[in-house]
Structure formats: C-alpha cells, structure tokens
Image (cartoon, rainbow, N blue to C red):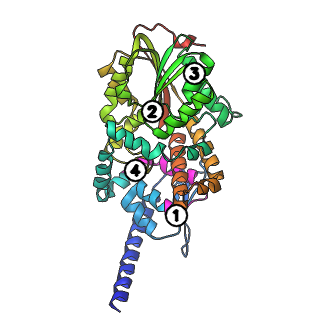
C-alpha cells in the first residue's frame, strides 16, 4: 500500500509540474509572431498562437505526452528535440513548425535563457570535453561519420558529397546539383593539369575524384574518419586515379608542403573556436606565394555568434559533437591575425542548403525500411528526421548561412570575375 501511495503522489507531482510548464510555455508561444501555430492536445481544445499572419505556412504541434511540456521548458531546444525523438510530440509538417520557431529565434532564445541554468552547466561541460584537440577531433569525427557508410549512401548523391549542393535552376535534381557545386569550385580556383591541390577534409573523396578526373590536377587529400578513408580509397582505386590522388589519414595540423590550390568543404565546422586561428594559419602555410584557397563554410550571423559560443544546441549535443559555426567576423579576424591571405570573393548559398537538406530528408525517410534493416531503431530515425528539418529551417530563415569564400595569397593576380 505504501508503494501505491508513493507512486500516486509522484504521479500527481509530475502532473502538477507538467501543468505549470504547459502554462509557461503556452504563454510564451502566444507572444510569437510571423505566422500561426496550432497546439493540439488530447482532451483539450486547440490553442492558437502567433500573430495570425497568413503569409507563412501554418504550423502545428501535437502533444502526445504531458511530460513534453517539462522537457521543452527545462531543456529548451534540446529538450524539445529529445521529446520529439521519444515520440512525446509530433507535427504534420515538422519543417514548417521549426521555421515558425526560427523566425522567432530571438524571443525563443530569451525564453530559453531564463531556464537554461537547469541544464546549461552540464551541457557546457560535455561540449568542453568534446573540444577539437588532435585526440578529440578523431573522437568527434568518429561519433558521426563512422556510423557506417551504408547509412550515408542511402540519402547522399552518387558523389557522396555531404555538404550543400548548388542548384542552378528549379529543374536541377540533387545528383546534378552536387556535380554542379564541385565544378563551380574547380572553376573558381581555375584548376588546371599543372596544379597541385591540397584538400582538408576528404569526405568520401567526391571533390578529389572530380578534380582529378575532369581537370587533370593532382590532389592530396586528408581525413581522420577511418570509414571515410577506406571508402574513398576504394573509390580512387576503382577509377584508376591512384597516380593523381594521394589519400592521407592525417590531422590537418600535421600536413606539410606547399600547394598551388587548397580546398576545404564544410570542414571548418569541425575546427572549434579555440583552433580557428591555427586552422587558417595552416591554410596559409600550405599555399605557395601565388596560391588560392576556397573554403565552403557554414556561418552564423554576427548578431548571434557570441551567444552561440556560450551555449550548446541540438546539433552539438546529438549530431556533431565538438562542432561550432563561425561568424564571418570570426573567420576574417582569424585570417587577419594569422595569415597574409586576402578574401577576393564570397558567395552565399543558404537557400541551396535548405533545398539540399530537403532532398536528403526525403531520401532518408523514403528509405526507412532499409535503415531499419541496417540496425537503426525508430528513435534514431526520428533523431535524423529532426536533424534534417532543424537545419533546413535554419537555412530557410537565414538563421545560418553557407558561403564559398575564395582567398588569395598576395602573389596571386587572378581576377575571380574572369574565371571560366
């Protein structure tokens, strides 16, 4: 009887806590703008939030477990993601819902900060442990990229490019856009058969294979993911390009030599703020006096960069341990302090990334049966569903961006406007 009474008491406390959390969260949601949000709960009338602006797609959240309110209140964005993965809430259009919240990002951040003292210290501690020292970088890369090549092959294009594609028009599909992006990079660098190219971050070899095959240059490329290295090596052998591609399993900080061109496609996010200056210093040292470097980088708006450095988000907690998104200011400051590089061109492709993520998510969700056969459970599928939608929302609402930034050494006199 005592155990029954104790269980009943705990249930009442949990219910009261959930009701309290519900009231606080709904009060905040009703202050949001730029759209309409409908909150649906079993046994309750629908709650309408937002300012009623119909220019934006309607958003809807369906609460299945009252505990979701507690998770959202105490855990903010991470708590909401955890509750989604647990199946405690769903949405008929997850991306539209997350875009609604992203349009209100400053209000959501302010609300989250009021309660972040509950979870923030532990999250910051975990993120500190994931900093990108040489040992930490390998561990962080393994945590994501060594999930298994078969998983990534399911949703990536045949080049296996795990970075934003570039769509020249609406009719272009993902496979075509990935190749277009690779060719765009090669043309911006004015690659030729005499060029020696160094790539920081091999991925599965997509860029190295494209550049060596179509431009005749020699590419030295490095990765610290064993899974990526082994598949890239297999692909290089299969295409008979061993004489044009040198594949390394080295940390970028240990690279030596000087090269005509350098490429780093969305690897900067794995560098960490403590190592940003050393990353650009190494880039500068690896280039000849007339060299060119193209960095494709996800970037954070200046207005939210300082807050991002002080906090840990869903991506850092569950998808890319140790990751960070630099601002343009942080990038240029690192370049100013540690190099003689000159930024000669920058192009934003944020909306292209939103479409890339949409295509990845569609392929991923269409292949759920195959993903289950690989041994991944429903929670993993929901986690990645949230990941794709979360990122798509960010790029769609310009909460984050992605740019191709071209840097030149002082001895390089190429006019980027005249590249073919």
Apparent side of residue 210 relative to residue 101 in the rendered image (left or right): right
* Residue 134 pos. (x, y %): 33, 36
| Label whose residue precedes the other's in the sequence (3 or 2) | 3
> Any magenta on residue 47?
no
The CA span between labels 1 and 4 is 20 Å
What number is the disc on residue 89?
1
| Label whose residue precedes the other's in the sequence (3 or 1) | 1
Circle 1 or circle 4, nearest the eye: 4
What number is the disc on residue 211?
3
The residue sitting at the bottom extreme is: 1
Q: Residues within 10 Å of mark 3 (few under 14, many from 20)?
A: many
Looking at the rendering, in which quadrant would you find the C terminus? top right
Circle 3 or circle 2, nearest the eye: 2
The residue sitting at the right extreme is: 171
Q: Which residue is mark 2?
A: 223
The CA span between labels 4 and 2 is 22 Å
Q: Which residues are magenta?
A: 85-109
| Label whose residue precedes the other's in the sequence (1 or 4) | 1
Apparent side of residue 368 relative to residue 138 in the rendered image (left or right): right
| Residues at marks 1 and 2 touching, judged by CB atoms closer than 8 Å | no
């Amino acid at each position: 009887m005592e155990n029954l009474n104790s269980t009943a008491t705990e249930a009442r406390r949990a219910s009261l806590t959930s009701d309290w959390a519900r009231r606080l969260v709904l009060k905040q949601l009703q202050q949001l703008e730029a759209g309409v949000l409908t909150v649906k709960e079993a046994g309750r009338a629908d709650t309408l939030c937002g300012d009623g602006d119909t220019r934006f797609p309607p958003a809807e959240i369906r609460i299945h477990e009252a505990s979701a309110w507690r998770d959202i209140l105490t855990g903010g964005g991470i708590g909401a993601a955890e509750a989604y993965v647990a199946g405690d809430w769903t949405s008929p259009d997850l991306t539209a819902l997350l875009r609604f919240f992203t349009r209100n990002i400053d209000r959501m951040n302010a609300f989250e900060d009021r309660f972040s003292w509950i979870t923030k210290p532990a999250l910051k501690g975990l993120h500190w442990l994931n900093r990108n020292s040489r040992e930490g970088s390998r561990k962080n890369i393994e945590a994501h990229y060594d999930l298994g090549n078969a998983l990534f092959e399911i949703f990536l294009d045949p080049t296996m490019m795990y970075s934003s594609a570039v769509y020249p028009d609406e009719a272009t599909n993902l496979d075509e856009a990935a190749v277009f992006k690779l060719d765009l990079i090669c043309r911006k660098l004015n690659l030729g058969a005499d060029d020696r190219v160094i790539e920081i971050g091999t991925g599965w070899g997509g860029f190295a294979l494209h550049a060596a095959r179509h431009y005749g240059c020699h590419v030295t490329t490095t990765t610290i993911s064993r899974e990526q290295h082994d598949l890239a090596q297999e692909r290089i052998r299969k295409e008979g390009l061993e004489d044009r591609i040198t594949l390394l399993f080295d940390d970028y900080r240990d690279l030596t030599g000087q090269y005509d061109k350098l490429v780093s496609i969305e690897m900067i996010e794995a560098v960490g703020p403590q190592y940003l200056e050393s990353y650009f210093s190494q880039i500068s040292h690896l280039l000849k006096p007339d060299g060119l470097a193209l960095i494709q980088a996800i970037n954070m708006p200046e207005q939210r960069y300082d807050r991002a450095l002080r906090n840990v988000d869903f991506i850092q907690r569950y998808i890319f341990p140790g990751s960070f998104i630099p601002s343009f200011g942080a990038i240029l400051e690192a370049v100013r302090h540690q190099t003689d590089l000159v930024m000669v061109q920058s192009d934003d492709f944020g909306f292209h990334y939103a479409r890339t993520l949409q295509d990845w998510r569609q392929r991923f969700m269409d292949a759920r049966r195959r993903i289950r056969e690989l041994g991944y459970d429903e929670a993993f599928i929901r986690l990645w569903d949230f990941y794709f939608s979360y990122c798509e929302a960010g790029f769609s609402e310009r909460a984050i961006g992605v740019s191709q930034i071209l840097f030149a050494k002082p001895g390089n006199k190429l006019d980027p406007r005249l590249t073919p």
